[in-house]
Amino acid sequence: MEFLLLVLNIAGAATLLLWAVRMVRTGFERVNGNAFRRAIQRSNANRFKAAGVGLLLAVLMQSSTAVAVLATGFAASGVIGLIPGMSLLLGADLGSALVVQILSFDLSWLMPILLLVGGTLFLKGRSSLLRQTGRIILGVGVILLSLQLISDATEPLRDSGFIVVTMSYLSEDLVASFLVGIIVTWLLHSSVASVLLIVALVGQQIVPPAVGVALILGTNLGAGLIAYGLTRNQNSVGRRIPTGNLLFRSIAAVLALIAMRFIELPVAENAMQSARWLVLCHLAFNATLLVLCLPFVGLMGWLTSRLLPSPVSDDRQVDPLMNRHTALDRAVLDTPQLALASATRECLRMSDVIELMLVPIMSLYDHTQKSATKDFSELEQHVNRLHSTIKLYLADLDDKFMTDQDTKRKLELTNFAINMEAVGDLVFKNLLNLARRKNRECLTFSTQGWSELTDLHKQVIANMHLALNVLVSGDISSARQLVEEKDRIRMQERNSNEQHLRRLQTGSVISIETSDIHLETLRALRQINSLFASGAYPILSHNGELLDSRLTQLHTR
């Protein structure tokens, strides 16, 4: 009975630690999610800038895995390149190690203050910013609390004969310790939580320092496996980034494990010093990984491109989507929940086709090939077919078997399909024609004007990904964020219009020649973004977070 209680206490404390780390990450994502996405997009300039951005984002989000998932999504859609993406992850690895360094200090005196302030802001905050700030502060306080609980829960293990025998065996077999570190990290799905747990056990003199180092090396490899596993459903281009990071981590961890056999580790004066030394080892490993591997990201990019080639040789990704079987299962029309799930999958498939049109459209402004025009025509026709089949499928759902929630979901999916079809028309009939006109007339945008257009295009793609998250999750905070981004895009379009008019006033010949194309491109991108954002309004309206009208109320006498 005592052993079962001991296991429950340790498992509960570890779960609390894992939840607290996730709580902090969620808070930062909800407060600065779009800022994080924009930072990743703008890190495409060079590998050093990308590594710095990755380090900063990992410190703020307390997770290199979260950065990896974001970077993989952007790489899959063509927003960032392979070399900056791999550099981003190397920087994120070091950022995650810095988080462990910060949290490993003795901050027990700060814990009650963080819990009080964070809890008050989270529960009583009147704005989303205050509540999410409270979530972050509360999460840090809970991390410190969970570490104290782990320390208290593992205290009885010091005198356990079984633990003594186990640790004695692991001390003699560092490979087994290395594998245990991988398994623990995979189970927790958080390298920060794993390292903090190992450090706590070393501080309690339960785990010997040498075993702790082997566990830490396994944790670093396990973190790479987590990112690889979470992104396995991306296309081959996106998967190259976590694959390259996993290879870097694996090579470095194995070499470090081999070196341990020939290097005698220093003996610490006490257990707490051993724990601090272990944290420094983790930090040094990731710093060394960044310094040594950053010059070789180009070579790793070449290798992963060979390991994960593009699905088609001529870079046209139309056929895989065209030949994919429909997700609309007519056998489940009598079960609304299953039918709506099938329709959701088909809507996501429709968005994949839209993404194939939207992502490369700005590159066609430089050079429009006939083959690209043909590809876009096929994709646009495919979008129209998907739009029709989704609408007809949802229309065949019998309302008498549906709840009010099912009816609302049916309307949301129908509107989503309609909006995606409209996006396809805007890309094919507006943007593609504008690109062809620019190249036919041999026009050139001004440097500032082209930068404004490409920045807006990248932000629209990021908002498309956010809109898909809203479609699947129905998350209120994400829906608010999407509407806020719509307002920001509108202001960005207005500012670009003003800047363009100023260039016209200066008599810039380039701006005068491309004026119509510039303004129409801005308008089309803003319309596309508005269509993406429209899916957020039903969610906000249903939860009472949307005003009925923007008009001021008129008071009559």
Image (spheres, rainbow, N blue to C red):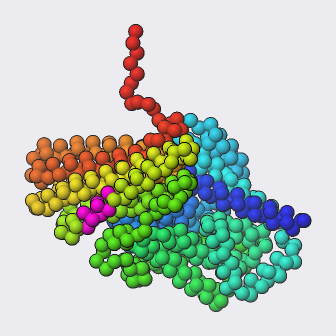
x and y percent of residue 267 in the render? Answer: 72, 79
Residue drawn at x 40%, y 53% as measured from the top left: 392
Instruction: Check if residue 532 falls in the magenta segment.
Output: no
- Relative to 161, say whether 466 is above or below: above
Image height of 91 relative to 178, above or below: above
Q: Position of residue 128 (x, y in %)?
A: 53, 41
Quarter of the figure that contains the C terminus = top left
Camera-nearest residue between 338 and 421: 338
Please provide percent x and percent y for residue 369. 19, 69
Does 509 sit left or right of 378 as displayed?
left
Magenta stretch bounds: 375-384
Question: Image point 14% across, 62% down: which residue?
Answer: 439
- The reply to whether residue 478 is in sight is no
Residue closest to the eye, 335 or 132: 335
Q: Quadrant of residue 334?
A: bottom right
Residue shown at the point (61%, 54%) measured from the top left: 23
